[in-house]
Image (tube, grey):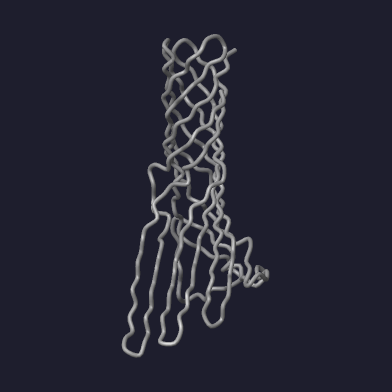
Amino acid sequence: KVGAGYNLGVPVLRLGTNFTENYYNTSSTSYTTETNEGVYDSFGKGMGFDGALGYTGETFGFEVGVQYKPTSSIELQSFENSYYSSSTSLETYTDNLKSSMLAISPCFVFRTDIGFYGRAGIVLGFPQLTNEVKDESNGSNPSTSEYTSEYTGDMALGYTGAFGMAVGSGGLKLFVEANFVNLTWAPTKIEITAYKVNGVDQLSTLSPSNRVTHLEDSYTTDSRSSASSDQEGVGLKQYLPFSSLGLRAGIVIGF
């Protein structure tokens, strides 16, 4: 069978924060205001395409499905506004998180004589995620910095299920189904693969400790040991959501 549909990002996790800071420094006063807004979403949302091969008897069967979610993006923004007696400045920091995923899902299937069917199984996900960051400042020394980070690491493992209805006769039927995927992914490495300042490539100026970060369940630092910029960095793992709840339609071809 082959099909396509749209997925809602459900359930969600916090991916980051939209942040605004206003700094006021005049002859009469000096103070700062901050606004923080959590960004809750899932990289599983958006269009999806899938196909499957399987075998079904009178009631039970199995199938192996392949799903592809094309690239979609989620944006985070931070603004830092500075107001002085004689001038103002603004710095804008934007994260553009772009994700896609290929997944394989072996499932058990049951069906009824009236065309109703359901399935349940596991999901083996192979996500791809990049973060395109842009930092723009229009202060006394205007500048623009841009870099791209790639997230890589282990396969994601979750579970999936669906129920739907197939109608038609003979070897060709149409189906409509509701489906869900519960899946999170913990990258094990973040690497900056592109870095520009005012349009000039500066990737070679980054030390290994700034360019590559390995993500672990835990790590230990010792203040008695001096850190070397020749060593790659280390940080904690974060589980990212690729879960979804969707509706799709397509065709089933029987042999």
Residue 136 place in picture, x, y as percent: 54, 71
Vertical position of residue 18 compared to residue 83: above or below:
above
Question: Who is closer to the viewer here, 87 or 21?
Answer: 87
Residue 241 place in picture, x, y as percent: 44, 47
Question: Who is closer to the viewer here, 206 or 208?
Answer: 206
Residue 74 place in picture, x, y as percent: 48, 52
Q: In which quarter of the image is the C terminus?
A: top right
Please give the name of the residue rendered at 52% of the width and 40% of the height, measured from the top-left corner.
Answer: 125
Using the rendered view, name the quadrant where residue 253 is placed.
Answer: top right
Vertical position of residue 17 compared to residue 109: above or below:
below
Q: Tell me: 113 left or right of 97.
A: left
Residue 12 place in picture, x, y as percent: 39, 47
Question: Who is closer to the viewer here, 236 or 170?
Answer: 170
Question: Who is closer to the viewer here, 116 or 149?
Answer: 116
Using the rendered view, name the quadrant where residue 21 is placed.
Answer: bottom left
Q: Tell me: 75 left or right of 191.
A: left
Q: In which quarter of the image is the N terminus?
A: top right
Please give the name of the residue rendered at 35% of the width and 67% of the height, measured from the top-left corner.
Answer: 35
